[in-house]
Amino acid sequence: MAKTVEGMQFKGTRGQIRKQKIETTGAIIVGALLTLWIIANIIESPVQFSQAAIAGLRNGLIYALIALGYTLVYGIIELINFAHGDLFMLGAVFSSFFITYWIGADQSNGFGWFAFGLCLVAVMIFGAVINVLIERFAYRKLRHAPRLSALITAVGISFILQFIGLKWNGSTPRQWPTIIPSGDIYIGEVRISLLTIQLFLIGLPLLFGLNYLVTNTKQGKAMRSVSQDKDASTLMGINVNKTIAFTFAIGGAMAGAAGLLYQQSIGTTNYNLGFQLGLIAFTSAVLGGIGNLWGAVIGGLLIGLIQGLNDGAPIGFGQAWSQTVVFAVLIIILVFKPAGILGKVTTEKV
Amino acid sequence: MSAMLEVKNIQVAYGKIIAVKDVSITVNQGEIVTLIGSNGAGKSTTLRTISGLIKPKSGQITFNGKRIDGMPGHEIVGLGVCHAPEGRRIFPRMTVRENLDLGAFLRTDKVEVAADVEKVLNLFPRLKERIDQRAGTLSGGEQQMLAVSRALMGNPKLLLLDEPSMGLAPVLVELIFETIAKIRKQGVTVLLIEQNATAALEVADRAYVLESGKVKMSGSAKELSADDKVTKAYLGH
C-alpha cells in the first residue's frame, strides 16, 4: 500500500479496494484447495507424499535456475529471451561431452567428483559466453527496435541453438552415466536419493549467491538501476552495455549449471529438451512475477512441487495430466494475481 | 578565467528531426551560466549532448581541454560532469539512500562519499526523513531535491541542471535557487536550464538565449535581464 507524503495510509479508490478483495479471496481459495490436496495426500500416505514432494522440488530447483535467466533478462531489457531454454539444453549436452568424452569420467568416485566440479565451472563459463555473444550480436542492435523484432530474433536464436543441439547430440535421446554418488539414504521410511541432496547442495548456494550479487554488490546495483532507467544510469557513470552483457552472462551461467544438474540427475539429453523445460521455466518466471528474482525461484519450486505431487502422490491426476495441472494452476493464479505471486503492478508518481 | 566547457557549433538530430542547429557556448570555471528559451529551443538536447547521451552530428565539445563529443556518457561522468536530467529521472524502485549511492557510483573514496551524503541531506533535510523510503513514493518536489542531490553525489566539477524548479511550489523554487548559489560557493561550476528565466538570470553570471536550435543572444545575466527583447519574450513583463 502506498503512503502519502504525510505518512497516512492510502487506501486507494473503491475499484482498487474491490480488486484487492478479489485477489485476497482468490488467493485464499487457491491456497485452501492446495492445502487440502496436500493434507489429503499426507493422510493417505505420508511416505509416498514426501518422496513425491522431494522429487518435485528437485525438478523445481532446475526450473528455478533456468527461470532466473528469463527473469534477469526480462528485468533488464524487457525481452522474453526464447533462446534461453535452448541454452540450457546446450549446457546439458556440453556437460555430457565434457564429462564422458573430454575428461573421460564414467563412474562415481573421487575422479568423478573432480570431473563434476570441473564441469560445473566449465559449463557455467560456456553458458555465460554463449549468452553474451547472443546479446552482443543479435539483441544489442535491436534494443530500440520495435518489441516484436527482438522477440522474433529470440525465436530465431532458439531454433539456431536447437539445431546446433541436434547436430551435436543427435536426433534421438542419449543416455549418460552419472558420475556423482547416486545411492539412497532413508530418513524414517522416506527414501531420498543422494543425487537429490547433492543437487540441492549445489543449486541452493547458486540461488543465494545470485541473490546476494544482485542485492548487495556494486554490479548488482548497476543491474537494478539499468533495469529502471538506462539514460539515468549512464548519467551515474554506469556502463549500460557492459551491465546488460553481465546480466546475460550470469543468466547463461545459471542455465549452464542447470544443464549439468539436469544431465547428472536425469541422465538423458535430447536436442528438444530446451523447448520443454524452457517453457516450464518461463512459466515459473511469470508465475513468480517476471523480473523478480525470488519470484522465479518460488515459481520454479512451486511448479516442480505441484508437478511432483500430481505425478507421484497417492491422490493426483497422474503423469498423463502433468502439464495440464501445471498450466491450470498457472492460469488460476494469474487470473487472481495477474502480475504473478511476487510481482507488483507498481504505480509511480511522474 | 579559463574555459572549462566549450561547445563549438554543435548540430544534433533525433533521426531526421534536427533539435539543435548551431549552438556554441562557453562555461568558465566557477561560473553559473544559464540557457533560457522556450520549449523546443534545444536547451535539453544541448545538455544531453554535453553529457554524452546523444552524439552530435557535427561540431565539437571540449571539457578542460579534452574532446568529449563522441565519448561514451558513462566516461564523461568520470571527468566530473554530473547531470540532473529533465524530468528528474530518479530510480523509483530504489530507496533515497540507494539513489544517492548511485550518484557516487564511480567514486572509490568511501569516507568522503559518506560525508557527502550527510552534506546533501543537510541541504535538503526533507530527504533525511525519507532516506529509507522508495524514491517513487516521494512527492514531485522531493524527487527534484533527490535528483539534484544525486547529481551532487558525483562530486561534480561541472553540474548540469535541467529545469530544477519544474513543477515546484514557490517556496521550494526559492530553496532550489538558494542551493544553486550555495553549490557554486563550494567551487562547483553550474550550467542551468530554466523556464523560470527571471530566477535564473538572478542567480546566473552569464546567459545564452536559445531559439529554434540556435543561440539568439548571449551576454552577462545583468545585460540580458535589462534587454527589451528578452524581457518581452522570456521574462513576461
Image (cartoon, coloured by chain):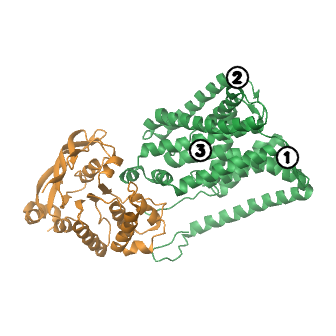
Chain colours: A green, B orange
Distance in Å between CA atoms under marks 2 and 1: 31 Å
Could you tell me which chain the residue with mark 2 belongs to?
A
- Front residue of A15/A161: it is A161
Q: Which mark is residue A170?
A: 2
Q: Amino acid at mark 3?
A: Tyr
Determine the secondary structure under disc 1. helix
The subunit carrying tag 1 is A
Q: Which of the two discs, 3 and 2, sits closer to the camera?
A: 2
Residue type indicated by callout 2: Gly
Q: Residues within 10 Å of mark 1 (few under 14, many from 20)?
A: many
Q: Residue at x 65, y 67 (%)?
A: A21
Same chain? Circles 1 and 3 = yes
Which residue in the structure is indicated by mark 3? Answer: A70
Residue where numbered disc 1 is placed:
A312
CA gap, disc 1 and disc 3: 28 Å
Which numbered circle lies on residue A282? Answer: none
What amino acid is at disc 1? Gly
> What element does badge 3 sit on?
helix
Which of A189 and B211 lies nearest the eye of the viewer?
A189
Judged left or right of residue A202, residue A151 is: left
Q: Is residue B101 visible in the rendered structure shown here? A: yes
User: Disc 2 or 1, which lies upstream in sequence?
Assistant: 2
Marked residue nearer the N-terminal end (1 or 3): 3
Q: Quadrant of the N terminus of chain A?
A: bottom right
Q: Residue at x 51, y 46 (%)?
A: A78
Q: Quadrant of residue A67?
A: top right
Q: Are circles 1 and 3 on residues that touch, CB within 8 Å?
A: no
